[in-house]
Image (spheres, grey):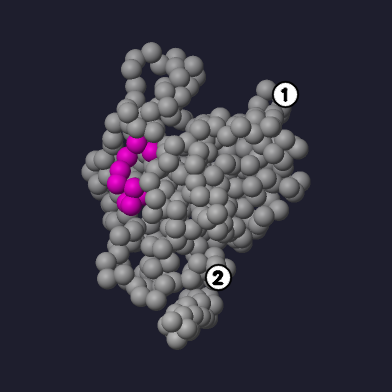
């Protein structure tokens, strides 16, 4: 027994050393830090479920994503591109650019207060596919080549966000509860969906980095509700109702340009921004265009559909019957390949 454990420890150490010694000169590499607490097991699976055969990911990278549900790639997006996205966001905040279909969100602590047209009034923009400069993020070749390893060659950009996490006002409202992104998506299969999330500056625990529960992507889609937080919760910030609180958490400390790819069932969230600056990240959820829409009636997503319909009726005056999938059909755009089902 002791000898077997010794062999396992030796192999895990060998895998870790290979991660740490990977050359950065060739460009983006697998981040060593998230692997420190979640090392590869002794054997790689003979069949991969969550990744597709390709010439990009190493066996260690594929196995890490299979086991943990996420993969961090360093230095993937250039500082020049990030500054372009930052400048476009500022133009949107100042009303210098009008984007059809764009959803502008504000923190619950400032939503009803007086504010000027500035980034301080905006905590997130969603559905920026109509903005050519921001949509360019979704079509960056260095991102799409990793996305293709998971969803295949026909890639739809389904959900786009630029997050401008504000300094917490003291009510802890800048937190994002632990959740699964699939809760919001009426399309399947889940394994052919992936998010790319890029840090637009250094992101750590001080300004509210992502926190993930490695391996939680192997579980089912869980019931989500609004958490009972003393400072209130932002609209549509649903949280997982029941999860194993003993599951180890990994805080993803990322530098500007680092990108994490993660599965839509991975339980994740983010903490408060305890700094005085705004923490920015840009992201896109991709899906294979071979995916299909589902009817969420009778599922854990039915409540979400009711909330989305209520918002549509209030904001846009929509009276005709709509479903959750109707909202997503107009939020997506082809990023690469052919549009098939979605």
The residue labelled by disc 2 is 36
For mark 1, does the 10 Å Cα neighbourhood hold few (<14), some (14 to 19), or many (20 or more) residues? few
**Mark positioned earlier in the residue sequence (2 or 1):** 2
For mark 2, does the 10 Å Cα neighbourhood hold few (<14), some (14 to 19), or many (20 or more) residues? some
Q: Quadrant of the N terminus?
A: bottom left
Where disc 1 sits, the SS reads loop
The stretch drawn in magenta includes residue 117: no
Q: In which quarter of the image is the C terminus?
A: top left
- Numbered badge on residue 318: none
Q: Is residue 51 left or right of residue 161?
A: left
Query: How far across and down, in percent of the image, does residue 316 sit?
Result: 46, 18
The number of numbered discs placed on residues in the rendered structure image is 2
Query: How far across and down, in percent of the image, does residue 280 sit?
Result: 62, 48
Can residue 325 be seen by looking at this rendering? no
Can residue 260 be seen by looking at this rendering? yes
Instruction: Decide which of 94, 70 is in the foreground and name it.
Output: 70
**Marks 2/1: CA–CA distance:** 46 Å
Query: How far across and down, in percent of the image, does residue 93 sit?
Result: 62, 35
Residue at x-position 50% and y-position 33%? 225
Q: Is residue 135 left or right of residue 32?
A: left
Residue at x-position 32% and y-position 40%? 187
Quadrant assignment, res 313: top left
Where disc 2 sits, the SS reads helix
The stretch drawn in magenta includes residue 188: yes
Q: What stretch is highlighted in magenta?
A: 185-194
- Numbered badge on residue 114: 1
Residue at x-position 72% and y-position 23%? 114
């Amino acid at each position: 027994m002791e000898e077997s454990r010794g062999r396992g420890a030796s192999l895990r150490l060998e895998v870790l050393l290979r991660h740490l010694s990977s050359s950065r000169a060739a460009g983006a590499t697998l981040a060593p830090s998230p692997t420190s607490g979640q090392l590869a097991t002794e054997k790689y699976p003979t069949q991969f479920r969550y990744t597709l055969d390709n010439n990009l990911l190493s066996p260690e990278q594929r196995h890490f994503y299979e086991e943990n549900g996420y993969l961090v790639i360093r230095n993937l997006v250039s500082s020049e591109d990030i500054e372009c996205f930052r400048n476009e966001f500022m133009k949107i905040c100042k009303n210098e650019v009008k984007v059809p279909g764009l959803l502008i969100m504000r923190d619950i602590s400032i939503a009803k207060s007086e504010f000027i047209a500035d980034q301080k009034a905006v905590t997130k923009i969603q559905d920026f596919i109509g903005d050519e400069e921001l949509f360019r993020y979704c079509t960056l070749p260095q991102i799409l080549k990793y996305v293709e390893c998971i969803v295949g060659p026909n890639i739809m950009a389904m959900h786009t966000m630029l997050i401008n996490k504000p300094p917490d006002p003291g009510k802890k409202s800048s937190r994002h509860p632990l959740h699964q992104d699939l809760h919001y998506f009426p399309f399947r299969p889940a394994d052919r969906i992936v998010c790319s999330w890029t840090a637009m500056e250094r992101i750590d625990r001080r300004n509210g980095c992502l926190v993930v529960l490695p391996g939680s992507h192997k579980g089912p889609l869980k019931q989500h509700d609004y958490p009972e937080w003393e400072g209130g919760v932002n609209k549509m910030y649903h949280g997982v109702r029941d999860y194993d609180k003993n599951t180890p958490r990994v805080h993803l400390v990322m530098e500007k340009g680092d990108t994490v790819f993660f599965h839509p069932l991975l339980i994740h969230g983010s903490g408060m921004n305890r700094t005085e600056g705004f923490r920015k990240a840009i992201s896109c959820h991709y899906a294979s265009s071979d995916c299909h829409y589902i009817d969420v009636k009778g599922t854990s997503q039915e409540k979400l559909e009711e909330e989305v319909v209520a918002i549509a009726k209030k904001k846009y005056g929509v009276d005709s019957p709509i479903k959750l999938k109707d909202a997503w059909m107009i939020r997506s755009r082809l990023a690469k390949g052919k549009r098939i089902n979605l």
